[in-house]
Image (cartoon, grey):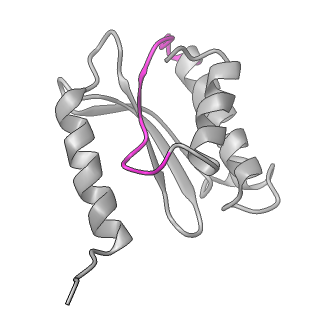
Amino acid sequence: MVSKKSRAEVRIKKHSRMRNRFSGTAERPRLSVFRSNNHMYAQIIDDTVGNTLVSASTLEKDVKSEIEKTNNVDAAAYLGTVIAKRALDKGIKTVVFDRGGFIYQGKVAALAEAAREAGLEF
């Protein structure tokens, strides 16, 4: 009988393989994206010291008040603009994009494109 791994297990393994290839530095931190069934989270991380420099999520009151739903493409795009504005305020212009093992389409792609349009380079 063929056993099939769950999507979560596949995503975690894929993410660990991706993390072996790149990490965030002080000059070019890592933009990490996580999406659950109900919310999206984005962090900009300096892996050399293990610090989160900037974060944003759809759980925050100011973000949640601007969007209708917290788990659709529009919410992801708005979150991308928010994380980019916060990063630019901190002086971060270039990042390494970490899609977290998720497929680059839909919400993850919308967040990335919105962050690029708002001024982040990756």
* 108 w.r.t. 70: above or below: above
Where residue 51 sits, quadrant-wise, is top left
Left or right: residue 105 compared with residue 70: left
* 100 w.r.t. 27: above or below: below
In the current view of this chain or complex, which residue is farthest to the bottom? 1
Magenta: predominant secondary structure element? loop
Q: Position of residue 105 (x, y in %)?
A: 59, 46
| Magenta region, residue range | 89-103
In the rendered image, residue 77 lying in the magenta stretch gets the answer no
Residue 121 or 59: which is nearer the viewer? Answer: 121
Tell me the residue at 76%/63% (across/down). Answer: 69
Name the quarter where the N terminus is drawn.
bottom left
* 75 w.r.t. 7: above or below: above
Q: Position of residue 6 (x, y in %)?
A: 32, 75
Q: Position of residue 99 (x, y in %)?
A: 43, 41
Where residue 112 sits, quadrant-wise, is top right
Left or right: residue 2 compared with residue 74: left
Residue 36 or 3: which is nearer the viewer? Answer: 3
In the current view of this chain or complex, which residue is farthest to the front? 1
In the rendered image, residue 93 lying in the magenta stretch gets the answer yes
